[in-house]
């Protein structure tokens, strides 16, 4: 068998080859020596931020080289010819440092298309506030496809002169409505840049997107400022909203955020509250009922003229209370529901009609019941509050998903009583579910488990097959005599009929 021979080859990389050439040729192009490190620098960037992450490396190479070799006999043409990838870094450096002379030299003398070298020159110049570069790029017809990114850079880094140039130059021809997005507003608030926010509201948006001031900029500024505890910006935004009579936006932030008492004086107490909007606000998820919504809603019902107790506006107060009660029941906001029932002077018939409607929790997330203890259970029983049947099945289904020993879990649930051992409404609802089935099936555990399985199968999103299989095995183990087997076959027939 022939022996295979192997040959080791040493391959010079470009920097290695340059070192060899330079070591034997005195007077070699010093620019090539300076740019040996250029292979460590990424030359293509998605946006200006990526360039800035490595700009210090570029500056360390480019600044001394230009100081030495860019003059009457500039070596830039030779540099671009010998190391083509440096053209991209060269024009980015020029835009970043406001060097119109370099950009003009590359464009006019080297006759290189600047956009072909880089598409982020507007971004870089706008970030630094180099208006002269921005104007030059416009004069030579540089591509406008990233002007929105450039506008964001100028806004975030507080360069209104750049934005004014964009307004004067492009507002008649380009749609500038989305050039300053919500994310930029958030960032300006986060960095406490009130001066730039004021300029945008006063100058930019009235021309670029007038509706955004009312619909996005001021409401988002207020919300973000409250969340980030930027009180000076919050007070400015509140005053602007007040001046524009945008009381709904003020009311929403006041209701749904903590430490907003300072905002209430900005709300016109004679505003006309839309009942449906008020209901949507007070049932907003992920906002504490007891700590935020209830104390703030108490102020609203006490202070706003349209919600006062007596005539002529008393009728609207009743409608608003009923709507808040209805949606709190629907969304499972039981702390709010209890506050309305126990502290507000509501018509008892209004309360009875709403709480006994079997709608409780219909639009709620099941695990929210874990927030409520046995005391809440007693309140619900006292007022005959009935949970929505689909919601109860969702709660039971989530319980089933979380247990591995289904038979043991079922035995525990059936041996407990609501008043004595259960700590949360999350467990109470499951016990009530099984109790109702037991009453309907005359106490037979096998029948209860069978009906439980049947109810789970009628859900729009039934539990996993493995969970259903475990319930079925439990049911099967309970049906040991002929009577039990007959009952099981009858229920299975019903399930099959439902499925078909």
Image (spheres, rainbow, N blue to C red):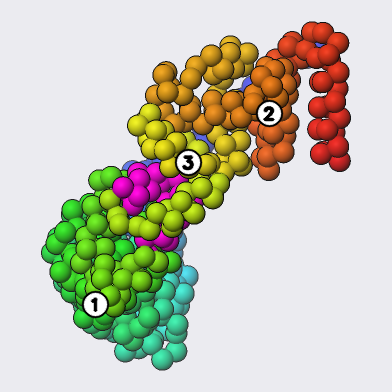
N-terminal label among 2 and 1 = 1
| Identity of the residue furthest to the top in this view | 480
Q: Quadrant of residue 75?
A: bottom left
Q: Magenta includes 330? A: yes
N-terminal label among 3 and 1 = 1
Name the residue carrying label 1.
Answer: 270
Name the residue carrying label 2.
Answer: 440
Give the magenta range. Answer: 320-342
Instruction: Please state the horizontal and vertical placement of residue 340, each as a whole percent of the image.
Output: 33, 52
- Which label was assigned to residue 384? 3
- Residue 462 as seen in the image, left or right of residue 411: right
Q: Magenta includes 493? A: no
Name the secondary structure under disc 1.
Answer: loop
- Residue drawn at x 45%, y 77% as measured from the top left: 143
N-terminal label among 2 and 3 = 3
Name the secondary structure under disc 3.
Answer: loop
In-front residue for pair 392/481: 481
Q: CA distance from mark 2 to mark 3?
A: 19 Å
Instruction: Please state the horizontal and vertical placement of residue 91, each as a whole percent of the image.
Output: 35, 68
Quadrant occupied by the C terminus: top right
């Amino acid at each position: 068998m022939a022996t295979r021979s192997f040959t080791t080859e040493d391959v010079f990389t470009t920097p290695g080859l340059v070192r060899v050439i330079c070591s034997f040729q005195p007077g070699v192009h010093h620019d090539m020596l300076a740019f040996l490190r250029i292979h460590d620098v990424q030359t293509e960037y998605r946006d200006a931020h990526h360039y800035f992450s490595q700009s210090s490396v570029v500056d360390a190479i480019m600044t001394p080289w230009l100081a030495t070799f860019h003059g009457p006999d500039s070596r830039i043409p030779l540099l671009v010819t010998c190391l083509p990838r440096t053209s991209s870094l060269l024009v980015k450096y020029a835009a970043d440092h406001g060097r119109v002379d370099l950009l003009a030299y590359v464009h006019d003398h080297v006759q290189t298309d600047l956009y072909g070298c880089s598409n982020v020159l507007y971004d870089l110049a706008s970030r630094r506030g180099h208006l002269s570069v921005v104007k030059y790029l416009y004069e030579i017809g540089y591509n406008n496809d990233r002007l929105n990114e450039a506008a964001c850079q100028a806004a975030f880094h507080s360069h209104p002169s750049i934005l004014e140039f964009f307004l004067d130059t492009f507002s008649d021809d380009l749609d500038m409505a989305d050039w300053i997005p919500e994310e930029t507003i958030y960032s300006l608030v986060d960095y406490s840049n009130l001066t730039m926010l004021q300029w945008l509201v006063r100058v930019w948006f009235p021309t670029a997107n007038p509706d955004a001031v009312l619909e996005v900029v001021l409401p988002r500024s207020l919300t973000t400022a409250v969340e980030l505890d930027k009180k000076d910006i919050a007070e400015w935004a509140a005053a602007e909203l007040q001046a524009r009579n945008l009381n709904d936006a003020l009311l929403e932030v006041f209701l749904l955020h903590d430490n907003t008492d300072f905002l209430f004086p900005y709300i016109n107490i004679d505003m006309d509250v839309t009942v449906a909007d008020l209901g949507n606000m007070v049932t907003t998820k992920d906002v504490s009922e007891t700590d935020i919504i209830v104390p703030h809603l108490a102020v609203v019902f006490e202070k706003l003229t349209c919600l006062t107790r007596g005539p002529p506006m008393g009728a609207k107060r009743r409608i608003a209370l009923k709507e808040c009660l209805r949606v709190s029941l629907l969304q499972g906001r039981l702390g709010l529901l209890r506050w309305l029932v126990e502290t507000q002077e509501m018509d008892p018939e209004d309360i009875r009609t709403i709480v006994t409607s079997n709608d409780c929790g219909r639009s709620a997330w099941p695990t929210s019941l874990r927030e409520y203890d046995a005391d809440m259970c007693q309140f619900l029983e006292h007022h005959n509050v009935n949970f929505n049947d689909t919601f109860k099945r969702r709660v039971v289904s989530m319980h089933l998903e979380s247990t591995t020993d289904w038979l043991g879990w079922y035995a525990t649930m059936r041996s407990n009583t609501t008043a004595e051992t259960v700590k949360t409404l999350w467990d109470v609802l499951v016990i009530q579910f099984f109790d109702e089935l037991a009453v309907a099936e005359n106490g037979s555990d096998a029948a209860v488990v069978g009906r439980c399985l049947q109810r789970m199968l009628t859900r729009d999103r039934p539990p996993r097959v493995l969970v259903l299989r475990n319930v079925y095995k439990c049911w099967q183990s309970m049906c040991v005599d002929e009577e039990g087997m007959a009952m099981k076959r009858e229920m299975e027939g019903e399930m099959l009929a439902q499925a078909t």
